[in-house]
Image: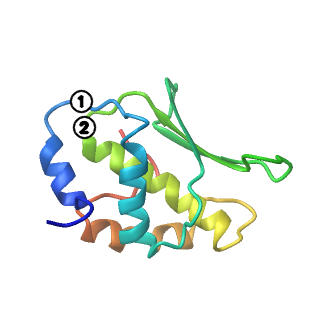
Amino acid sequence: MPRTKSLAMLIQQHGDERGYKPNLKKIPLVYKILNRQLFKNQLKKMPKIMVRRMHGALGLFEFNPYALKYCHQITLHHKFKNFREFVEILGHEMVHYYQKLILKQNSARHNKEFYSFKKKFEKLGLNLKRVYQ
């Protein structure tokens, strides 16, 4: 039996038919799997992750170069249409975190480096897009 569940197994377990509300206890597990499979464990430190109601977005990556404790933060919407959408949004925001932390880009935008992860997402059965609906 593997130590951690695979992403495909988690997605299959939750299914695509029902809504998903992120659980702050489960987010680190999904983060760890995505970090291993997409970023080869390069994202050593997990940013602060918040879940709240958001208008006009499903996820948001923020950074503050002047903050002392939490410089990077990922905020996720409190409801998703399914678990797969939650994983795609978390992965999307992790790409922005990678751009800032590893690539040292001044702004984490939807640029060439961002879309270079599209094939990695597709191998996992996920979509990497600029806008999710």
Q: Residue at x 24, y 37 (%)?
A: 82
Compare residues 82 and 127 and report the one nearer the observer. Answer: 82
Instruction: Report the disc number at residue 120.
Output: none
Taking 38 as reference, is 5 left or right? left
Instruction: Return the x and y of residue 102 as percentages of the image width and height.
Output: 63, 72
The mark nearer the N terminus, 2 or 1, is 1
Q: Quadrant of the N terminus?
A: bottom left
Q: Quadrant of residue 86?
A: top left
Compare residues 93 and 27 and report the one nearer the observer. Answer: 27
Q: Residue at x 25, y 64 (%)?
A: 3
C-alpha gap between disc 2 and disc 1: 4 Å
Taking 113 as reference, is 1 left or right? left
Compare residues 37 and 110 and report the one nearer the observer. Answer: 37
Instruction: Report the disc number at residue 82.
Output: 2
Q: Residue at x 17, y 41 (%)?
A: 14
Q: Secondary structure at mark 1?
A: loop
Question: What amino acid is found at the position of numbered circle 2 in the picture?
Answer: Asn
Q: Residue at x 28, y 59 (%)?
A: 126
Compare residues 10 and 110 and report the one nearer the observer. Answer: 10
Q: Quadrant of residue 33?
A: bottom left
Q: Secondary structure at mark 2?
A: loop
Instruction: Return the x and y of residue 89 as percentages of the image width and height.
Output: 41, 47
Residue position marked by numbered label 1 in the rendering: 19
Q: Are marks 2 and 1 in contact (CB under 8 Å)?
A: yes
Taking 86 as reference, is 41 left or right? right
Is 104 rendered above or below residue 65? below
Question: What amino acid is found at the position of numbered circle 1 in the picture?
Answer: Gly
**Coloured how?**
rainbow
Instruction: Sort mark 1 into few (<14), some (14-19) or many (20+) by Cα contacts within 10 Å.
Output: some
Instruction: Return the x and y of residue 15 as percentages of the image width and height.
Output: 14, 42
